[in-house]
C-alpha cells in the first residue's frame, strides 16, 4: 500500500473541494492511503512537494489547484512555473500527478473539477499512481 501526499493550493474553495474529492476517491479506490496539506498558491505546490519528498514518508504526490486567467500576465507565470516545477521534480524521479487546473473561467474549471464530468483531481491521482508503478517497475 502506497502513501500519497496531496498538496493543494486552496484559493477557490468550492473548486478545490471537487478536485480533492476526485483525488481522494481515486487513491482510496486503488487501496492506498493519503494525507492533504495546503499551501498559499499554485506556485508553492512544487516547493512543498520537494520538501515533503525529503521526509521519505510519501510514495507519490498529487498537486491540486485552480488558476483562472485574469487581466494580467500573472496567469501565465503561475500556470507555466507551477507546471515547470512539477515536471522538474518528476524528472528527478518523483511520482507526481498534476491536478492544477489552468482555465479561462470558472465554468471551465467546474467542468474539469467535477467527478461526474472531467474529474481532473481523480485523473491526477491516477497519473501519480501510474508513475509510482513505473518507478517501481524500473527499480527492480
Image (spheres, grey):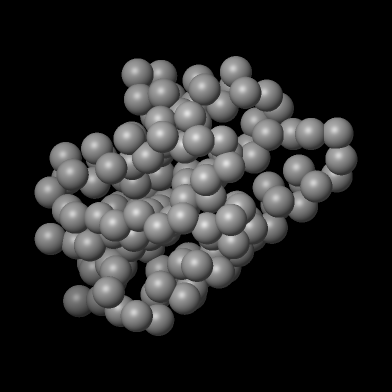
Q: Is residue 38 left or right of residue 35?
A: right
Residue 87 rendering spot, x and y as whole percentages? 56, 61
Residue 71 rendering spot, x and y as whole percentages? 86, 34
Residue 27 rendering spot, x and y as whole percentages? 24, 46
Q: Is residue 30 above or below residue 13?
A: below
The answer to which quarter of the image holds residue 100 is top right
Residue at point 53%, 50% (across, down): 9
Q: Is residue 68 visible?
A: yes
Query: In the depicted view, which residue is nearer to us: 138 or 23?
Result: 23
Q: Is residue 45 above or below residue 19?
A: below
Query: In the depicted view, which residue is nearer to us: 131 or 37?
Result: 37
Residue at point 68%, 47% (across, down): 79
Quarter of the picture containing the N terminus is: bottom left
Residue at point 40%, 44% (across, down): 124
The answer to which quarter of the image holds residue 96 is bottom left
Q: Is residue 121 left or right of residue 108?
A: left
The answer to which quarter of the image holds residue 103 is top right
Q: Is residue 9 left or right of residue 61?
A: right
Q: Residue most toward the right?
A: 72
Amino acid at each position: 500500500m502506497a502513501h500519497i501526499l496531496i498538496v493543494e493550493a486552496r484559493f477557490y474553495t468550492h473548486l478545490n473541494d471537487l478536485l480533492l474529492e476526485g483525488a481522494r476517491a481515486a487513491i482510496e479506490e486503488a487501496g492506498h492511503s493519503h494525507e492533504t496539506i495546503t499551501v498559499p498558491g499554485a506556485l508553492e505546490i512544487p516547493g512543498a512537494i520537494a520538501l515533503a519528498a525529503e521526509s521519505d514518508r510519501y510514495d507519490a504526490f498529487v498537486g491540486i489547484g485552480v488558476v483562472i486567467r485574469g487581466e494580467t500576465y500573472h496567469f501565465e507565470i503561475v500556470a507555466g512555473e507551477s507546471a515547470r516545477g512539477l515536471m522538474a521534480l518528476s524528472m528527478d524521479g518523483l511520482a507526481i500527478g498534476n491536478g492544477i487546473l489552468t482555465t479561462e473561467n470558472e465554468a471551465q474549471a467546474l467542468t474539469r473539477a467535477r467527478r461526474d464530468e472531467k474529474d481532473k483531481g481523480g485523473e491526477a491521482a491516477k497519473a501519480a499512481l501510474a508513475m509510482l508503478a513505473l518507478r517501481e517497475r524500473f527499480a527492480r
